[in-house]
Image (tube, coloured by chain):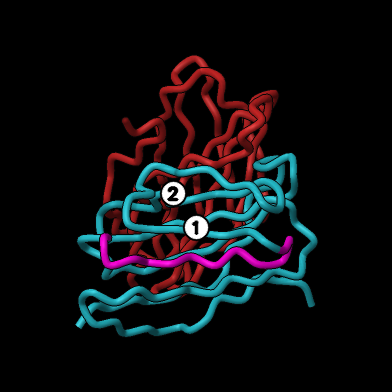
Chain colours: A red, B cyan
Amino acid sequence: DQQVKQNSPSLSVQEGRISILNCDYTNSMFDYFLWYKKYPAEGPTFLISISSIKDKNEDGRFTVFLNKSAKHLSLHIVPSQPGDSAVYFCAASDRGSTLGRLYFGRGTQLTVWP
Amino acid sequence: DGGITQSPKYLFRKEGQNVTLSCEQNLNHDAMYWYRQDPGQGLRLIYYSQIVNDFQKGDIAEGYSVSREKKESFPLTVTSAQKNPTAFYLCASSTMTGADYGYTFGSGTRLTVV
């Protein structure tokens, strides 16, 4: 049972435009959310995170929005650049749990074309 | 520089053979994890360990085994019982609080059964 869902396997955006990647979760105990970026044949790298006490976190061109009532978060990339082309994974955790594990979505392949 | 080292980067195995994937970290992290990535499947948790000499099965542990004799090392053995071992394997580590700050990932091992 997938607790974190990324329903769009792929997204194609023109350079300079906004990329919006979406993520839904089912577990109401999740209180910390992260986005990872992954290039082929490499490990994922941390991009940005947000705690459930916030509804927005911004870091340069990247902004994550959290809507707790809808159990939905999104990653906005503005402006998009060709180097942003990668797979983006959404992840969530319940920091009150002793297990300390992240739950990942299946990823969205972002392609930014010139 | 601290980080996680996975070796080898590419590994070929004959059917019926066991192989061991190495994962070493010098981040002084307590928790370590093994994930498997398949196309369209995202990251699936195989095993994880929160302290030395202790580990738990993840979501797809069948056909795999691990050990955690040292804090720095968490090797994964892919046994002949694993029916479809060809995949990209990722090792990760985190602080004892687990997902407070997310994971640090290694660069992965591509295993191919020939």
Up the image or down, A73 lies above or below B12; here it is above
Question: Main SS of the magenta segment?
Answer: loop
Given the image, what chain letter belongs to the residue carrying mark 1?
A: B
In the figure, residue B23 lies in which quadrant?
Answer: bottom right
In the figure, residue A24 lies in which quadrant?
Answer: top left
Query: Which residue corresponds to mark 2?
Result: B45
Depth order, front residue of A110/B5: B5
Local SS, label 1: strand
Q: Quadrant of the N terminus of chain A?
A: top left
**Residue A87: horizontal and vertical position, in percent?**
39, 60
Q: Are marks 1 and 2 in contact (CB under 8 Å)?
A: yes
At 40% from the left and 39% from the top, the residue drawn is A22
Given the image, what chain letter belongs to the residue carrying mark 2?
A: B
Write down the region rendered in magenta: B70-81
Query: Which residue corresponds to mark 1?
Result: B34
| B79 inside magenta stretch | yes
- Asked if residue B108 lies left or right of residue A8, the reply is right
Local SS, label 2: strand
At 56% from the left and 20% from the top, the residue drawn is A29
Q: Are marks 1 and 2 on the same chain?
A: yes
- Asked if residue A114 lies left or right of residue B52, the reply is left
Cα distance, mark 1 to mark 2?
A: 6 Å
Type of residue at label 2?
A: Leu
**Residue B48: horizontal and vertical position, in percent?**
55, 49
Q: Quadrant of the C terminus of chain A?
A: bottom left
Which numbered disc flags the more N-terminal residue, 1 or 2?
1
At 51% from the left and 59% from the top, the residue drawn is B66
Depth order, front residue of A91/A61: A91
Type of residue at label 1?
A: Trp
In this view of the protein, can residue A79 be seen by the observer?
Answer: no
Q: How busy is the neighbourhood of tag 2: few (under 14 within 10 Å), some, or many (20 plus)?
A: many
| A3 inside magenta stretch | no
